[in-house]
Amino acid sequence: MGETVVKNMRSKQLLEKGLLRSLLHLGQLESVLNQVGGMMNRKEESEVELSIERRFCGVKEYLPNAVEAAWRLQKWPLLTELLEKQDQIEEENLKKGNLKKHRSEEGMDPESKFQIGVGRAMLGLHEMKKEKVKIALDKTRIGLMEDMSNVARESYSRSLDVLLKFHCLHEIEQSTEILCKKDKTGFLETSQSCGKDGWDWSGRLSNLGRGDSDGIITVRLALAKLANAKALEGDLWLTAAKRARKSHHFHIAEPALSRSLAAYSIAGENFNDDTSKVMLQIAKVKHVQKKTSDALMIIEPRSADRILSGSDKREVQKLKKDHYLDSLEDFENRTLCATRWMVESNLKFGAGIVKRFKQIVNICKTSEKTNFYFARYCDGLVESRIASMIAGDYDKKTSKGRELTEELEECSTEDDKRVQIMKRDPECHRYINFALKYYGIALAHGDKHMYQALPRMLTMWFEVTSIPVSVEESQLSRSRGKKQVHYSKRQTTEKTYTSDVDRVWAECITSVTKMMSAHGRSIPEHIFYSALPQLISRIAHPHADTQTTTVKILKKVLVAYPRQAMWGLAWLRYSHSSTRKSYGEEIFREAASTLRRTTDNDHASNLLMESIVLFKMLKSIADNDRVSQGKTFALSPLRFNSNSKITLQDFVPPVQAALSMNVTQRMNRSEKQKRQKGVVAEVFPQYVPRMESFSEKGTVFNTKAKPKKITAYAVGQRRGRRGGEGRVGEIH
């Protein structure tokens, strides 16, 4: 009978424990305290001998949640009472000889141990007693260490939660020195500092998910309240609200934003920009909840309309000054959000949105984000316009409409119809120019959106210039008197277009070509490197000027990153196409010449010239069909020119880790300004194992194509070492 009662009681307590944890997660801290009070004081219909077991289970399951709610609410008398209650139960168990069996923290899960330990540490910080804080932290670490050793055997994901608890204890320990003083003024600056003695709180959260960061933010909020750092408290509530909103937990995001707004208002007028960020997040929550009108009222007041229209000249100049950089960034975020929501809600479209984007770009000219979104919108207008016209949504009564209808009826495929619409529609010409222009400007000012902007810009450029123009060429000659004399040097060619459509389309191609030539000079090399295969594939483009611009871009990339770019460009020199092959030779030759002129040493130039030795060897191995499947073959040694001082170690191995860019998405303001100026450091990994030699023999796979495999060994490692140690990789 007694065992059944205990079993039922245990099941009920586990359910109630889950309820309390859910309330803590939702931020319903007062409800947690009320629930725990009722659960601890109720009377169970059980025998007297079960009372100790019931009381201990109540402490183990309920009290840790009440302790956390108390220190999060800063209710220090209640926290003291709860911790004393736990000590009393422990003393009672000690008197009855049950300490070994029912020790207070024995059998507790890591979360309960953490809640009790942090509660003791927070109480010590409130009382400004360093020794009490140290004892609480040490005891909690010892309690968690056993749990850590158990879960670490299973997987990293299981141990992450305990590791984050250790990290929270470390942050409490870091703040002890400041919080145990009467003067706590340095807390805000130290928490945000990235220096030697700073804590860099924002940087530590950058790689954690929302669920993983909740515990850290909760502890930091309690520390910020102890330090009376209202601005930091507002930042933490805002961070928690952002993460909750992105996870669609709006019931958590809305109260967090309200608390953030209250904290900033107490902090003072110096944090008005942060208040504006909170309002932006509130508007985003409203928009997701289908309250777009309310969101627009919050995010874009009437002053924004005056600034965009240019009527408030003083505000425009004020935003453009460097002193108001944060205000300009906030203005940009607000107006871009509002513009996107207007498009989604069909409040504005077409020319109205384009005009609005132009006004934002005029104020935020160097913003990568603004230029990118404008270009993407124009790109979308081109595609939607073409699709609607293919479906017959255009005026067919005009002469141009009738001509377009006749041309579309003769087209057999959708691609042919697309070409005819692009050639004949002036609105498409206009939006194509806008899209290419602002894609290029965005890429010239940053690389955050390069994987979205660059491939699309190149695709649009190659497509536009590949559409042919019908012309008739006639030679002009100068006459002297009655006798007509031809001068070979002065002889010119005049292009006569077969129709006005071809003439207008030729003008569009000319403007696009000039624009892309300018983008080729302004966009940094590392951005073009990310689209190297796409550029190489169109090097034999049918349009002559497009070929020339593509070759110039590839030369630019090869000069900037000769060791990495040579692997993608090398196979142009062995192409079966004479055009591609000649361009490959030209790119390597002129890049080597440029490096020789612009650098102090000739090493990089010699590396490009001697690379032909390495690539010839690899090509000869690939072309060797005399070896049977599954057999091995001997490799001939590499012989570079001794005067060039080039060895195999100078080449970067052709493996993904060595040739992939390492472009960070999170940068501080100084790094962003360097990127805008084209100064990019650490684009590729700093350390890459270098090749010392190849294996003496290669292997032919057992397939019809007879692919070969050779092994490259790293510098300082003996060849033939077992277990694959010292290998850079296998080249197929």
Image (cartoon, rainbow, N blue to C red):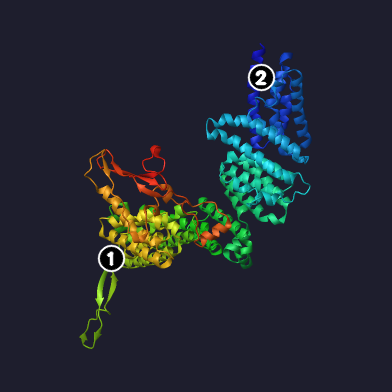
Name, please, the residue furthest toward the bottom. Answer: 481
Quadrant in which residue 54 is drawn: top right
When the figure is inspected, residue 497 is found, relative to residue 614, above or below; the finding is below
Which amino acid type is marked by label 1?
A: Ser
Helix, strand or loop status at disc 2 = helix
Query: In the drawing, what numbered circle is on residue 470?
Result: 1
Q: Residue furthest top?
A: 1
> Foreground: 496 or 239?
239
Which x, y percent locates residue 61? Answer: 67, 26
Indicate the amino acid at tag 2: Met
Foreground mark, 2 or 1, reads 2
**Which quadrant of the structure image shows residue 458?**
bottom left
Looking at the image, is 250 positioned above or below residue 660?
above
Query: Which quadrant: the N terminus?
Result: top right
In this picture, residue 622 sits left or right of residue 440? left
Residue 471 coordinates in the image, percent (x, y)? 28, 68
Q: Nearer the viewer, residue 566 or 264?
A: 566
In the shown orientation, is residue 360 left or right of residue 2? left
Position in image of residue 577 (x %, y %): 26, 57
626 vs 101, left or right, is left
| Earlier sequence position, callout 2 versus callout 1 | 2
C-alpha distance separating marks 2 and 1: 89 Å
Residue of label 2:
9
Q: Which mark is residue 403?
A: none
Marks 2,1: beta carbons within 8 A: no
Q: Which image quadrant is residue 629 in?
A: top left
| Residue beneath the point at 27% across and 74% down | 493
